[in-house]
Amino acid sequence: MRMPTVITATADARPLDERVAHVADIAARYAGEVDAAARFPAEAVDAMRSTGLLGASLPVGLGGEGLTLVQLGSIAAKLGAACSSTGMVFAMHHSQVLSLSRHLGGSASLAVLAGRIGTEQLLLASATTELGIGGDVRSSLCFVDLEGDKVRLVKNAPVISYGSEADLVLVTARRNADSAPSDQVLVVCDAANLDLEATGGWDTLGLRGTASMGYKLNALVPADRVIPEAYEAISSETMLPVCHVLWASVWLGMARALVETSRQYVRAAARRSIGSVPPGATKLVDLIAELERFEQLVDGMARRTDAIYDDREALGGVGFAVSINNLKVTASELVAQIAIAALSITGISGYRNDGKHSVARIFRDAQGAALMVHNDRIIANTARLILVQKG
Amino acid sequence: MSAVIETVQRVLDTHAKLKVPASTLSDDADLYGAGMTSHASVNVMLALEDAFDVEFPDALLTKSTFCTTGAIRTAVEGLLEAAA
């Protein structure tokens, strides 16, 4: 288990762009090793910490940088282009930071805790899935069990991404032993108050660095660590919109990297046969057009979400929920298609795991996008939503 | 004469479709005026990348980069310096 972080926010005074470039450089340097060993991208996450990026989304009032989703998405894309797993950790972390910091419900102790994310550069993970609920994160079996002034949580989680690396884990559970499965709350658990017994490893086709292992979680935390607001609201107003925008941004970054490698491959082929347009060039035209559609989709939804960021009614509305679900589905399909097209263009050079025109690692990572929270499940949820959507 | 300029002239003679040998043109003579088409300039760019093992970034992919032998030499030397 990770010891509580002692680094206080090293006031890295460099402009945001320079700090992001620094983290992206480190992420790129270790991306191959992280993938080969299926290990957590510790160097890149340490760099996020030392550059203050773990507090990037935290509101200024809580000591963070208060970045917009457009800005966070831009960072997520740059990190995703360098190392998919690093980008996903950044995206998942900030979706949790905002799920806490935007839903304090007037709790002074939760506000203090949120402030520590900035000052101590805490890494946040989430435990939303549970064995026995059929994969529906909007229902729980486990429940908040009051023990004096503390609460006990016991959860069998098939996946907690980088759970053993996190300083805080946000756990969903039923409000109490008598609550319905969908009457959920979110509980913030310190690593120090948390026992995680690993139940499975993480040896996958791609995204091998997210360390998304299964755990039996047992936590005993102060009762004021239960976020008062219903998880239903946190989920629709913050968790889903932020996750989907930032995931889509990471995938966009991966797509940019795939297109760039394809472009370099085609240009190298053109140098070998000057005067004739190499066969991959026409496919590259289509690929660039697809990337442009992808860029517009992600940018449009990030801007739309920023525009209604403080309008809880609009965020909770059916129309927005449908759009934000469709963003996840469409973006995950686009990155997978772009990966296939990039492989087709780069051929055996792209298929190789080594060499400067390899697209193998990102190709494998890209196929995971549609599966992590399976598109089929999201489409089924959206189908239920449109039955009640008006106009 | 520098090795860079010799290679640039060789590339121009092979790919630029100039009406006269590149060595007979001055450093600041307009290559487009001497017969290089924009299509030929793409081949010149690719051949220069191959000859010098460099890649022109987007910012340098403008008509002015390839309009004279001198401009090409400046661009190539800049890229070689950056790669060194």
Image (spheres, grey):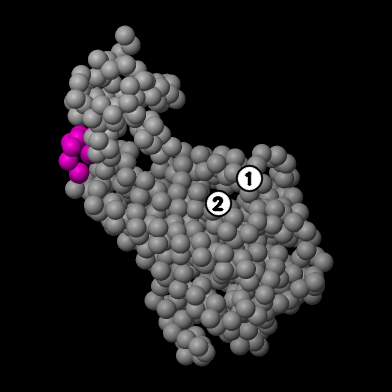
Label 2 resides on the chain identified as: A
Q: CB of mark 1 within 8 Å of CB of mark 2?
A: yes
User: Does residue A352 lie above or below A181 as drawn?
Assistant: above
Residue at the front extreme of this rendering: B33
Tell me which residue sits at (53%, 81%) in the image: A319
Q: Quadrant of residue A354?
A: top left
Label 1 resides on the chain identified as: A
> In this figure, which residue is indicated by the disc labeled 1?
A16
User: Does residue A382 lie above or below A250 as drawn?
Assistant: below
Q: Amino acid at mark 2?
A: Ile
Tell me which residue sits at (33%, 11%) in the image: B2
Q: How far across and down, in percent of the image, does residue B47 sit? A: 25, 29
Q: How far across and down, in percent of the image, does residue A64 sit? A: 72, 54
User: Does residue A90 lie above or below B21 as drawn?
Assistant: below
Q: Earlier in the sequence, mark 1 or mark 2?
A: 1
Q: Quadrant of residue A263?
A: top left
Q: Amino acid at mark 1?
A: Leu
User: Does residue B77 lie above or below A20 as drawn?
Assistant: above
- Magenta span dominant secondary structure: loop
Describe residue A170's horizontal placement relative to residue A26 as left or right: right
Q: CA distance from mark 1 to mark 2?
A: 9 Å
Around disc 2, counting alpha carbons within 10 Å, would you say few (fewer than 14), some (14 to 19), or many (20 or more)? many
> In this figure, which residue is indicated by the disc labeled 2?
A75
